[in-house]
Structures are given as structure tokens and as C-alpha cells.
Amino acid sequence: METRTPATCDTARSPGTWDGRATRALIDLDCIASNVFTLLRAVSPARLMAVVKGDAYGHGAGAVAQVALESGATSLGVFTVSEGCALRAAGIHAPILVFGPIYPAEVDALFTNRLTPTISSMAMAELVLGCAHGRSLPFHVEVDTGMTRGGVSVESVIPLVRRLDGRDELELEGVYTHFAGADYPDEPSAGQQLAVFREVVENIRSQRIAIPVVHAANSSAALHFPEARFAMVRAGIALYGYHPHVAGDVCPPLKPALSLLSGVSRVSHVAAGTGVGYGDTFRCERDSTVALIPVGYADGLHRTLGNGRGEVLIGGKRVPIVGRVSMDQITVDVTDIGDVQVGDEVVLIGSQAGIDQTADDVAAQAGTISYEVLTSLLPRVPRLYSRWGVVTDSHSAELRGSTPA
Ligand SMILES: Cc1ncc(COP(=O)(O)O)c(C=O)c1O
């Protein structure tokens, strides 16, 4: 059997491998595979739905979906019909559950792409029935057990499933709920929601309506709330290597898959008193060296990271972002770290010389959560993928100098 070099982020970081834009995201698909194995070990015998909405939390839905399925996930979760259609166009054949609402213009695509809708109201049920024209699909029902976001109310669920019971066009495959507070271990709401959900499931079954798949758990509940695992868990953030839990619980090892990298594009030596960036919000207090980096809010970098709140790694050291984040560029103060050259690697998310800056760290600096930091990355940022030691760009072309050993 061919021996392959384990994929590492270094592969696409070595000089000569990538001659595109300095700002790029490197996604280590081996980390995604490892996180799938970790999740499956934790939740077995429950099955795993890989949640790949929001372009797989910024990682690229097609690539992540493929690796998650190869690694043992049995289905995918998206929010919109168009996200599901894009996965079908990328050659994904696995079941895809659409969590979000279905609009009239999308119903036909639902059938032609064999997507599984979530039916959360009688109106949505009638809409899909009216457009079936002899076709059929499985469907899931989401029950609002206390989050007051999506889902049919507890009172309306029995009329809804009875309306659809026995219809050829729509066959009940799953019933699920979503927790408002599973990330917070001291928060009793998940337990309360679970009790309500169990009662709903019993009520449906007491109508002699079979429910092939019951599911409730997101990443946090999957890992920390075993009673909520049922037949399947729906994991998003853990798939990408982040622990959803805010408190210090014992967690299995997850591997962050995404690095956001760039390179220094200019180095300026400026006198004390010089203003840096829009609005003169930063003035150097001393003679300073500032480095320019070609990444900004049009790449998805949060503007709140400006003026000393955010940091990047250069030369294995943390340096502060000074002045405002502009659309395409930021400036960092490198006065204290010695020689910095144009082309030096900049790590915005990832690790450098043994120092980590995770999406959680960036989220804390920006005043948000890892989910938003990751999903904010815009299409302008090229995605590079590393799998089994082979690095490809988002169009699956192998990059120079990165063939397997
Ligand atoms: C219905 C549903 N299930 C599962 C998930 C995955 O959540 P997490 O990323 O916390 O695992 C989400 C994400 O928001 C969701 O909306």
C-alpha cells in the first residue's frame, strides 16, 4: 500500500507551494476526518449528521461534506435549499436535511435535488404537497420545545403529522428539536427542552405514527448530554475542531481545521506622533515599525479587531493590530519583534512557531464567538485544502511541490 505523508498545514505554507494571493485560508481536511472519528467514538451507536450550512462554517461545504461522509457521517445538514443544491451539484449523493424554511420558488428544486425538507407548519406542508406532482420525499419535523426560533409549536405538531400521515408525497423520516442552551452546563433549559421533546415524541407514537429517526443534539449536547443523543446527532462546530462548551468540562481532543494566513506586504519605519490608518485613531507614541497586511473586512476580518484589540502572529510573536481595520488591509505594530521583511508569514488564525491563535481567541478579541469568526470568511479568500499530504486549491487543482511522498 502506498505510504502517504500526513497532511499538515506546513505543506501549503512552504515557499513555492502557493503563488496566489498572500491572504488565504488553509483547511486541513485530515483534521475534519479526525474530528468525525472523535465524534463518532463519543456518540456511538448514534449516527452523525455533519452540519455544513454556512459553507461548512466558512471551510467550504463541498470539500468538508465529502470528507465527513468518507469518515463516517451518514447525512448532511444545511439551512437553505440552495446550499443543498450546491452540494448535489458538487456530486454529493448522501441525504441532505434542509433546516430552514422552504419558499414557493424552491419547492421544485427540493424534489429534483432529492433534498429532505423540514416541515414546520401546515402552510409549508400544503406548499410542498401542492408541488409534488406525483413525486415523493422524506421529511423531518422540527418541534419548538422552548428555543422560540424554528419549529412547529408543541400544540400544533400532532395535527401536522396527522395531516401528512399516509401521504405518498411526504413520508415522515425524522422528528427533531434544537437546544437553546446546551453550551452552558449550568443552564437547566436543555433538560427542560428534552423533557418536552420526549413527551412530543411519545404523543406522535401514540397516534401509531412511526418516527424512524429522532434527533436533538448539536455538538455540545452530543459531547456532554448523552440523554439527548437518540439515534443521531447533528454536529457543526465540533466538526471544525472547536469545543462548543463554555465551561471547563473534559472534552475529547478536537483539531481546529482552518488556518487563516497572509504575508507582510510593506514595512514602514515611522516617527513618534505619526497617525496610522483611517481616522487617525492610532498615533505612534514612539518611533515605530509598522507592517501592512493585505487582509480586511472585505475578507471577513471583523472591524472591531482594530485599535489594539486584535492580534496576529509574525515571527512566532503576537503583535497588535493598530489603527482601524480597513476594507482590504490592516497595519500591525512590529517595533518590538526585530527584523520583519516583506513576505514574512502572518497568521491570523492558526499556529506559528508553537504559538496558537484559535478562532476562539480571535472571537474573544472581536467580542463574538468562533462560529461568527469562521463563517465571516468571505469568498474573496482563496481556500486551500490539505488531504493525505496533497494540497489542492478550491478548484481541486494540485498545487506545485505538494505531491505525496
Ligand atoms: C438545527 C441545527 N442543528 C445543529 C446545528 C449545529 O450546531 P453546532 O455547530 O453547535 O454543533 C445547528 C447550528 O446552528 C442547527 O441550526
Image (cartoon, rainbow, N blue to C red):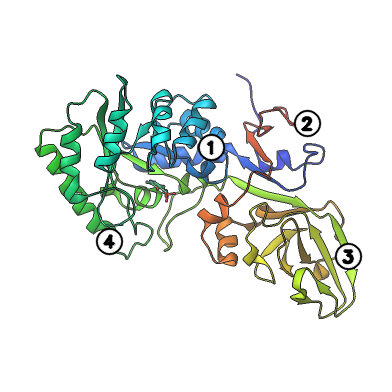
Q: Quadrant of the N terminus?
A: top right
Front label number (3 vs 2): 3
Mark 4 near mark 2, Cβ–Cβ under 8 Å? no
Q: CA distance from mark 3 to mark 4?
A: 53 Å
Secondary structure of the residue carrying tag 4 is helix
How crowded pointer 2 is (Cα within 10 Å; few <14, some 14-19, many 20+) is rated as: some
Q: Is residue 405 above or below residue 134?
A: below
Secondary structure of the residue carrying tag 2 is loop
Q: Position of residue 323 (x, y in %)?
A: 74, 70
Q: CA distance from mark 4 to mark 2?
A: 52 Å
Q: Is residue 398 left or right of residue 119?
A: right
Q: What residue is shown with label 3?
A: 268
Secondary structure of the residue carrying tag 3 is strand
Checking the image for residue 61, the label placed there is 1
Q: What residue is shown with label 4?
A: 189
The amino acid type of the residue labelled 3 equals: Ser
The amino acid type of the residue labelled 4 equals: Ser
Looking at the image, tell me whether mark 4 or mark 2 is earlier in sequence order: 4
Q: Position of residue 352 (x, y in %)?
A: 70, 54
Mark 3 near mark 1, Cβ–Cβ under 8 Å? no
The amino acid type of the residue labelled 2 equals: Gly
Looking at the image, tell me whether mark 1 or mark 2 is earlier in sequence order: 1
Mark 3 near mark 2, Cβ–Cβ under 8 Å? no
Q: What residue is shown with label 2?
A: 401
Q: CA distance from mark 4 to mark 1?
A: 31 Å
Checking the image for residue 230, the label placed there is none
Mark 3 near mark 4, Cβ–Cβ under 8 Å? no
